[in-house]
Amino acid sequence: MEEAVIYRLLALDLDGTLIGRDLVIPERVTRAIAAAQARGVAVTLATGRMFGATLPFAERLHLHDPLICYQGALIRHPITGEIYAHVGMPGALASEAITLLRAADIFVIAYIDERLCISARRPELDTYMRWHPEGAEVVVVPDLAALMLQTPPTKLLFVADPAIVEREMARLAAHFAGRLSVVRSHAIFGELTALGISKGSALATLAAQLGVPREQVIAIGDQENDLPMITWAGLGLAMGNAIPEVLQAADAIVPPVEEAGVAWAIERYLLGEQKV
């Protein structure tokens, strides 16, 4: 009889996985994560959010392991603030991307030192901020492309209608092939980071730092940007509300975020409380 795997590291996407549109962590999920940590499981959040926007969730869950932010461009400790890894975008490429997007009249946010840098305030900023009730410093820089050459960003994010995001994802991926990573994190969000940056590469880095082998890692997510970590982890799980590509790539599917699927997954694979 094959021996059951003992999982030692759990990586959780935030939006659409740990939390729904209400941005509230269900009590059942909080209890399950606490129980997993009590058993010695390291728990990290792997998100496109900034460190400052991720920290409140880490604090509510009493996490004490490094967090993966900015789609994997930053690994930082939630308590000490120590930075384990940070890979910013090349300034010239960030400037080029902003110029292309602005020429198409698409709203872009550049993330620099935990600030949101924009060329002008537009309704898209309000749309974006609905996901960020914690607030964030917004800096208006009319010539945003020029700023990138002086102060390269950690990542870029653009906001548009789903069809436009889909169009721009294809255009940018082709234009920056071999130069930047381009990923869709939501129906209305597209993101660009340095080449090779992903939640999967960051999770591999973190696992190595913690001394946890790949086969003892669980990753759970729901969107395109979660695919690299779901396919890298020893056990990759898709939320029931995940996009088709994630559902197909995952090793198993857990209940949707509205049904506290993360708690179910922890109970099933880490605590042994759920039957197949």
Image: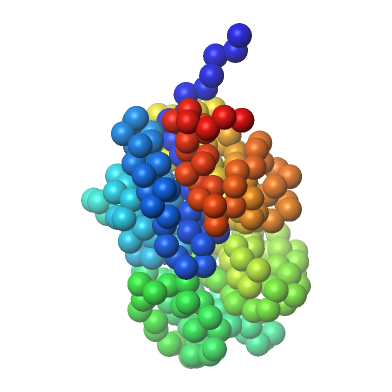
Q: Most extreme residue toward the top, as rendered?
A: 1
Against 196, residue 54 (above or below) is: below
Toward the viewer: 239 or 113? 239
Q: Is residue 141 left or right of residue 252?
A: left
- Give the camera-side residue of 99 and 202: 202
Q: Position of residue 175 (x, y in %)?
A: 72, 67
Q: Can residue 82 be spotted in the picture?
A: no
Residue at image position (36%, 76%) is 135
Q: Is residue 244 left or right of residue 220?
A: right
Q: How many marks?
A: 0
Q: Quadrant of the C terminus?
A: top right
Provide residue 230's location: percent of width, then percent of height: 60, 43
The residue located at (42%, 62%) in the rendering is: 24
The answer to whether one can see residue 166 in this image is yes
Of the 4 image quadrants, the one containing the N terminus is top right
Indicate the quadrant where residue 192 lies. Answer: bottom right
Q: On the image, which quarter does residue 32 sit in? A: top left
Q: Nearer the viewer, residue 251 or 35?
A: 35
Location of residue 74 in the rendering, given as x and y in whole percent from the top left corner: 42, 55
Against 167, is 177 above or below? above
**255 shown above or below 163:** above
Vertical order, 132 against 177 (above or below) = below
- Residue at x 47%, y 24% (from the top left corner): 6
Q: At which x and y percent is residue 208? A: 44, 33
